[in-house]
Amino acid sequence: MTPMDNSARCGPDPRVIKQAISWALRLRNNRANVRLREQCEQWREAHHDHEVAWQRVQALQQELSGTLAAIPGARVALENSAQGLGRRQALKLLTGVLVAGSAAWASRDLTGWQRWTSDFATATGERRSIQLSDGTRLQLNTDSAVDLAFNPQQRLINLVRGEILVTCGAAASAPLLVQTRHGLFEGIDGRFAVHQTSDCTRLSVVSGNVTIHSPHQPNGLSTQAHAGDNYLVRQTQALLAPPLAMDIGAWADGLIVTRNMRLADFLSEVGRYRPGYLGCAAEVADLRLSGVYRLENTDQLLAILARTLPVQVRYRTRWWVSLERLA
């Protein structure tokens, strides 16, 4: 499988869709502004792609309003709707164009762009496995996106967001590289996971070796990571980190395998596989659990927790769930 050519992607340019989102938000906040509405109509009529982008953005309202409006404090950020896209298409177009009672949620309004425009991507709760042209196996965890640049001169995986598990063979004509905003990782005949967050990138080496090239390390030095190593990588440094309280890469098999893991940390991990909020009261946050849990049905997983720990699961809505001490 070869990287997707940008020219092969159908639909409006992402910049045009971003303009459509901007128009929709401006109109939403200025409902009585007739002049602004006329200007928007002129923009839509200026090019066929403008109208297509507009309709897609409007369609997202219908797709998300029915499922997300129930979140406490939430309000959908785009008004009106045209004919709906499929859920997967809509989520790839724009996930998080709403305010769920917090500025942090609102700041996510354009992150769906990365999934919609990337070579390979997954939605929340989805996992995907890809066999690349050189034999490398690339697995994407929930809510992840990558771009590929494979040619005779380089084999580069750009992790746009989320987490991947890479299984690679011995070095070919060009090294296998994984790039995040925090550094560059060179895989050498092994298996390793790379998880990018806003603050840092976590590297976990299952087997083989990985060379970490951090952009601003003194004298351009690199760090060698070996099987069993975990590193937290920022632009200025790569620090050895303690192992996680769960098996690296178990998610690729649809599992989360824990070892004496804090409940709060466990819920944070499970929350990556379902929409909305999942958390717990402070009084039960330090409860510990060990076991093997399936990720395919997180509601069922939570029900199991309620049978094995002194907690109860409280659903304010389908998308706002908290665990509290059993009364």
Image (cartoon, rainbow, N blue to C red):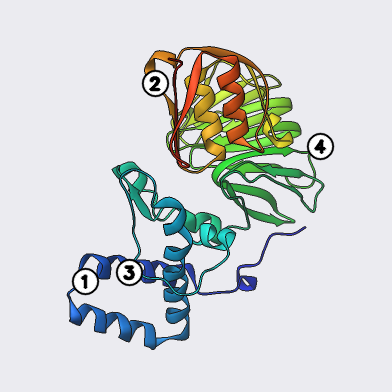
Q: Which mark is residue 24?
A: 3
Q: Are marks 2 and 1 in contact (CB under 8 Å)?
A: no
Residue ID at (19%, 81%): 34
Q: Are marks 2 and 4 in contact (CB under 8 Å)?
A: no
Secondary structure, mark 4, is: loop
**CA separation in Å, label 4 and label 1:** 60 Å
Foreground mark, 2 or 4? 2
Q: Of the two numbered discs 4 and 1 on the same chain, state the one appearing first in sequence.
A: 1
Residue 180 x/y as whole percent: 53, 42
The amino acid marked with disc number 2 is Ala
The amino acid marked with disc number 1 is Arg
Query: Number of callouts in the render?
Result: 4
Q: Are marks 2 and 3 in contact (CB under 8 Å)?
A: no
Q: Of the two numbered discs 2 and 3 on the same chain, state the one appearing first in sequence.
A: 3
**CA separation in Å, label 2 and label 4:** 48 Å
Q: Which mark is residue 281?
A: 2
Q: Which mark is residue 170?
A: 4
Residue ID at (56%, 31%): 270
Residue 206 x/y as whole percent: 71, 25
**CA separation in Å, label 1 and label 3:** 10 Å
Foreground mark, 2 or 3? 2
Decide: is 244 above or below 151: above
- Residue in the foreground of this view, choosing between 52 and 308: 308
The amino acid marked with disc number 3 is Ala
- Residue in the foreground of this view, choosing between 189 and 101: 101
